[in-house]
Amino acid sequence: MAENNNGIYKIRPAARLIHTIGSDLIGDAYAALVELVKNSYDADSSKVDITFEYKLIDNTDALVISVIDDGHGMSFDTIINKWLVPATADKLKRKESPNKKRKFQGRKGIGRFAASILGQEMTLTSIDEKGEKSTAIIDWRIFNTDDYLENIELLVEKENTQQESGTFIEIIAKDEKDDYKVSSWDKSSIEELTKELRKLISPFEDFDNDSFNINLSFINSPFSNQIDENISIETYPIIELYDYRISGVINENGNAELLFENNVNTEVKQSEVINTNYILEGNGKYCGKLKVDFRVFDREPEAIDNLINKGLIDPVSKKIMGSLEARQELNKIYGVNIYKSFFRIRPYGNAGVDWLKLDNRRIQNPSQRIGNNQIVGFITIQPEEESNLEEKSARDGLKENEYFFGLKELADKALSEIETRRFIFRERSQKSRPHRITIKDNLSNLFSFSELSNNIESKLEQFNVTKKNIKQITSILKKEEESKTGLLEDIQKTIAIYQGQATLGKIVNFILHEGRKPIQFFNSETKVIERYIRHYKATKDEELLDELDTSLEGFKNNSKIISELFRRVNPLAKQKRGSRKDFNILPIINNSFQIFKENINESNLAIDIDCDKDLVLYGWEEDLFIALTNLIENSVYWLELSNQEEKKISISVSKIDDNIKFDYKDNGTGLTEKEIESDIIFEPGYSKKLNGTGLGLAIAGEAIERLNGRLTARKFDEGVYFQIEIKK
C-alpha cells in the first residue's frame, strides 16, 4: 500500500539564502559599505567612522574593517527580532527615524547582510539610549552549509553599560581559498571607494541643517600614501567652479522654478529665472517633486585654463592644478547622479553610466548638446510613496516603470534649458554672427565671383595693367560666373528635393493616420464582398447585388480619400523639379492643412485662413508647401499637448505693394524671448520635442529663402507667431 504523505508543510530556507540576499544580490564591496553607512544615518548618528586596519591575526595577514557611529543604537530585542530577521518590514512601516525624523534609507531589510562581502567574520556591538549593550558574533562561512537556516545558531549577548549610545561593527577579512577578501582591496579599489563615498551624500545646501559626516582612515596600510591617513569625506570642490548651471525645483505637476547661471566670466556672472510648465510627451508619468542641479563644464583647452583660473586647488598639495590634473578631476565626477533623501542611488553618476543617453544626443548635434563627460548633475527624488520611484533590491538603480520614464523626460527638459542658453552664449561670443547664415547664402557666396573680380582688378591696377586688359579679364570672370548660374539652380533643386523628402518623413505619422480608416475599410469590406459573391453564386439572390453596390460605393469614396492624400503629399515626394512659375497661394495653404485633417479634427483645433484666392507667388510651389507643412506639424504637435480650452491656428496673407506677407500664429506653448532673439530655433538639430530631429524650422526657413523670402519668429504672448515676407 502506498504511503500517504498529504499534509501541511512549511517553506524551509537553506542557510545559503543569507549569501543570496546579501553578497550575491548587492554585488560589490563598495555597495556593502554604503549599506552600512546608510544604516548609521538611519540610526540618527551625526557621523560614521570607517577604518581599514592591516594586522596579523593568528599569524595570518588580515584586514579589519570597522564601521562606528554615534546613533541611538539597537536594543537586544531589536537585534534578535529585527536586525537578524531578513526582509523585515520594520523600516518600511516606520518610514522615518525616531529622533531626527530622517527618511529611512534602508527599507527592504536585506542590505546589512551584504557585510559578508567585506569579510568572513563580523562582530556587531550596539548600545541603545537606555545603556543596554548587545553583542552579536557572526561567522559568515557557516551560511555556506547545506543545512537549513533555522538550524544555524548565532551568539548574541547583552549587558548594561554607562557608555554612550552607538553601534560598532568590526569585520575581519582574510585571504582564503577561493575567497580573497584582503587582496581584493588594492590602491585602485580604495581610490574608487573614496570616490564612491565622496559622491554618496548630496551636496545640496539643505543637508547642512542635519549634519552627517563620513570619515575614512587607514592604519598600517601597505600603500605608502595611505599609511595612518585620515580622510574627512567631502564633496569635490571643483563642482563650485562650473561654467553653466541650472538648478531649482520641478513639482509633482511639472511646474518648474529654475535658475540659470552663466559663470564663464566670474566677474560678470549672469543669471536668469525660469518659470515654466513641463508637459510629458512620452509614456512617462510625473514622479513627485524633483530637485535638479545641473552643472556644465566646457572642455576646450581655453575652457580648462579658465577653470583653473577660477581657483582650482589640489586638496592635498594645496597647489593650483595643471591642465592634465583638471581634466582628471573632471573625469572623477562627471555624470548625472540621482539622490533619495540625501543619499546617491547607484549606479547613476558612475563612470560610463550615461542613463540619460547624453552622448547619443550629442552625436546628432555636437554644437548644442551636452555630453555626459561635460556635466555634473544632481537630481533628488522623494521617497517611494511620494515619487513611485522604487529602488531595485540589488542596489543597481531604479525600477524602469512609467514614473522612471517621466523622471528621464523631466531631466531632459531641464537640461535643454541650459543647453539652449549655453548655445546662444557660445554662438554670440565666439562666432558673433549678426544673422543666421542659410544654405542659399552660402551657395550664393560660393558661386559669386564679384569679390574675386574686385580683388583681381585692384591688383592688376597696381601692376599698371591697362584698363582695356583689366576689362577683358573681368569680363571673362563675369562670363564664368554666369555659366555657373545653371549649376547653382540645379544644386538648389536637389537640395529642395531632399528637403521635401525629409519633410515627408517628418509627417509620415500624420499621413498614416489619415489613411488608416480607408485601409481598415478595404480590409474589412473585402471579406464582406467575398461573402456576398459566394452567396450570390449559390442562391442567385438579386438583393445581394444591391449590397454589393453599397460596398462598391464605399470603395469609391475611400479610394478617393487615399488618392487625394497622395495628391496632396506628391509635392514632397517629387524626384524632379521643373522651372519656377507663378502659382496661387490659397490652394497650397489648404492642401497643407489637409495633410493633418484627422489630427486637427480629433484635437478639435480651430483653423482660420485669411487669403485672397487671387494672390500669386513666383517660384516653386513645393517650397511654400514644405514651409507650411513644417509649421503646421509643429503647431499640431504642441497644441495636442497644450491645456488650452480653445486651440487654434491662424494664417493671414496680405499683399504690400508687390510683396507678400504671411502672418502665421497658434495659441500653443510658444517660444522664449531668447529663442526668438537668437534665431536658434532655425539651427538644424535644435528641438524641444521628445525625440525631435530639429530639422523642421531649418527646412522651412530654407524653403522660404528659395522663394526670395525670409521666415522670422516674432514675439507673441499667446503662442507662436511666424512671419513670412517674400519680395517680388
Image (cartoon, helix red, strand yellow):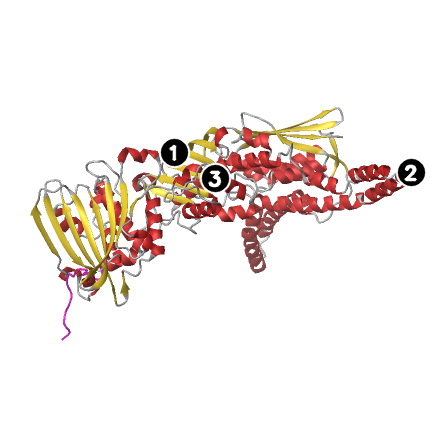
Counting from the top left corner in percent of width and height, residue 426 is at 56, 36
Coordinates of residue 144 in the picture (x, y in percent) = 21, 64
> Can you tell which quarter of the image residue 424 is in?
top right
Q: Main secondary structure of the magenta part?
A: loop
Residues at marks 1 and 3, CA–CA distance in whole angstroms: 33 Å
Q: Which residue is mark 3?
A: 307
Q: Residues within 10 Å of mark 1 (few under 14, many from 20)?
A: some
For label 1, the SS is loop
In this orientation, does residue 107 appear?
no
> Is 552 colored magenta in this rendering?
no
- Which amino acid lies under the numbered mark 1 shown in the image of this protein? Asn
Q: Dividing the image into 4 quarters, which one contains the C terminus?
A: top right
Q: Which residues are magenta?
A: 1-18
- What amino acid is at disc 3? Leu
Tell me the SS state at disc 3. helix
Camera-side residue: 343 or 355? Answer: 343
